[in-house]
Image (cartoon, helix red, strand yellow):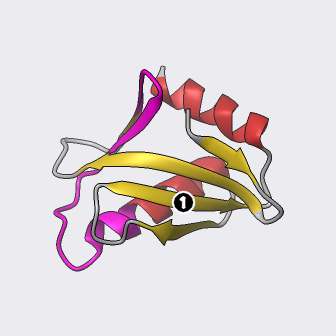
Amino acid sequence: MKIAETEDGVVLEVFVRPRAKNFRIVADGDEIVIFCEEEPIKGKVNKEIVRELSKLLHRKVELLSGFTSKQKRLLIRDAGKSEIERVLLEQAG
């Protein structure tokens, strides 16, 4: 998994698949894939990712890079790497 701990929190690198039937997180080898329901128009996918991960992790989530790309870097504020890994692995099944 591409997770790095920083002063501000945890930086998470994910690959996004828009237009899925439901929002879900899948661990695919070393990649974290997030399936989003939204269309990739006017930042709808980015908003969905931030909203759903904020709910799931109970932390503030910010998009650092990948605003128009399927490869995204997210900052999860005030979180530890082990905590984020545990929650993501539970979700990824």
Position of 38 with respect to 12 (left or right) is left
Q: Nearer the viewer, residue 88 or 8?
A: 8
Residue 78: x percent and y percent?
80, 60
Residue 26: x percent and y percent?
40, 30
Residue 14: x percent and y percent?
44, 47
Q: Residue at x 50, y 68 (%)?
A: 63
Position of 6 with respect to 19 (left or right) is right
Position of 31 with respect to 64 (left or right) is left
Q: Residue at x 68, y 40 (%)?
A: 84
Q: Is residue 84 above or below residue 27?
A: below
Q: Nearer the viewer, residue 46 or 67?
A: 67
Residue 35: x percent and y percent?
30, 43
Q: Is residue 58 above or below residue 29?
A: below
**What range of the chain is rendered magenta?**
26-48
Looking at the rendered structure, the kind of residue marked 1 is Leu
Q: Residue at x 18, y 41 (%)?
A: 21
Q: Secondary structure at mark 1?
A: strand
Q: Quadrant of the N terminus?
A: top right
Q: Residue at x 39, y 70 (%)?
A: 47
Judge the density around disc 1: few (<14), some (14-19), many (≥20) Cα neighbours within 10 Å: many
Position of 20 with respect to 47 (left or right) is left
Q: Quadrant of residue 88?
A: top right
In the rendered image, which residue does mark 1 sit on? 74
Residue 17 lies in the magenta-colored region:
no
Q: Nearer the viewer, residue 54 or 14?
A: 14
